Image: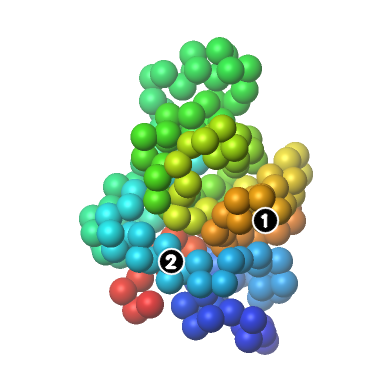
């Protein structure tokens, strides 16, 4: 029912998990990925890389027992500094929370499933010289900024490794499913 021939076996397994999470077999048509992204992200997790999640919904969907190195799953959205930082930067709390990722960003797996502003702010950090993550996974869902934020990752001049759902679809469940597939020992 779904053609996975354009994906490596490991990338295809992650896409299948994303399809299961969404219940939409046509999701494969909207998957944008850097070939080999799952293998690269899995190696990063094996080396102890943290997972940075835009929301607690994404963070809670990640299964700790699957993580190969007891990897930290970090969501800074409830950090007490976020509200003031959002006001200072003139942005959303989710984007301000990404500002607190700087010290964890180098080689991390970034899991963004809800907030386009988080993805836009991540790209701004990278453009300003912040360390590069190993991979960006998932994709914000919605009508305002979701499409544009994901397309900005795909077209980024630094050729960021990614596994994203293009268009308006995305969300916490799809993002967490992708991370769980990446972390899975079966890969």
Query: In the image, what residue occupies the spot 73% across and 41% down?
Result: 145
Residue 117: image location, x then y, percent = 63, 35
Question: From this viewpoint, is residue 183 visible?
Answer: no
Q: CA distance from mark 2 to mark 1?
A: 17 Å
Query: In the image, what residue occupies the spot 56% across and 49% down?
Result: 113
Residue 143: image location, x then y, percent = 76, 44
Give the farthest residue toward the left. 70
For disc 1, the marked residue is: 154
Mark 1 surroundings within 10 Å by alpha-carbon count, few (fewer than 14), some (14 through 19), many (20 or more):
many
Query: In the image, what residue occupies the spot 45% across and 55% down?
Result: 134
Q: How is the image coloured?
A: rainbow
For disc 2, the marked residue is: 40
Question: From this viewpoint, is residue 1 visible?
Answer: yes
Q: Earlier in the sequence, mark 2 or mark 1?
A: 2
Query: In the image, what residue occupies the spot 66% across and 50% down?
Result: 157
Residue 162: image location, x then y, percent = 56, 59
Quarter of the image for residue 33 reads bottom right
Foreground residue among 66 and 163: 163
């Amino acid at each position: 029912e779904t053609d996975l021939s354009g994906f490596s076996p490991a990338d295809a397994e992650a896409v299948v998990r994303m399809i299961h999470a969404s219940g939409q077999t046509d999701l494969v048509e909207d998957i944008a990925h850097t070939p080999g992204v799952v293998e690269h992200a899995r190696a990063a997790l094996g080396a102890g890389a943290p997972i940075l999640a835009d929301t607690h919904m994404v963070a809670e969907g990640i299964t700790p027992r699957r993580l190969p190195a007891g990897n930290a799953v970090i969501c800074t959205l409830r950090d007490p500094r976020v509200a003031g930082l959002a006001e200072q930067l003139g942005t959303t709390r989710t984007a301000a929370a990404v500002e607190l990722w700087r010290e964890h960003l180098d080689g991390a797996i970034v899991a963004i499933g809800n907030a386009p502003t988080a993805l836009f702010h991540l790209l701004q950090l990278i453009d300003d010289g912040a360390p590069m993550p190993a991979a960006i996974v998932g994709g914000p869902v919605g009508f305002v900024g979701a499409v544009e934020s994901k397309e900005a990752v795909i077209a980024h001049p630094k050729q960021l490794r990614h596994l994203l759902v293009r268009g308006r679809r995305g969300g916490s469940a799809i993002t967490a499913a992708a991370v769980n597939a990446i972390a899975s020992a079966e890969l």
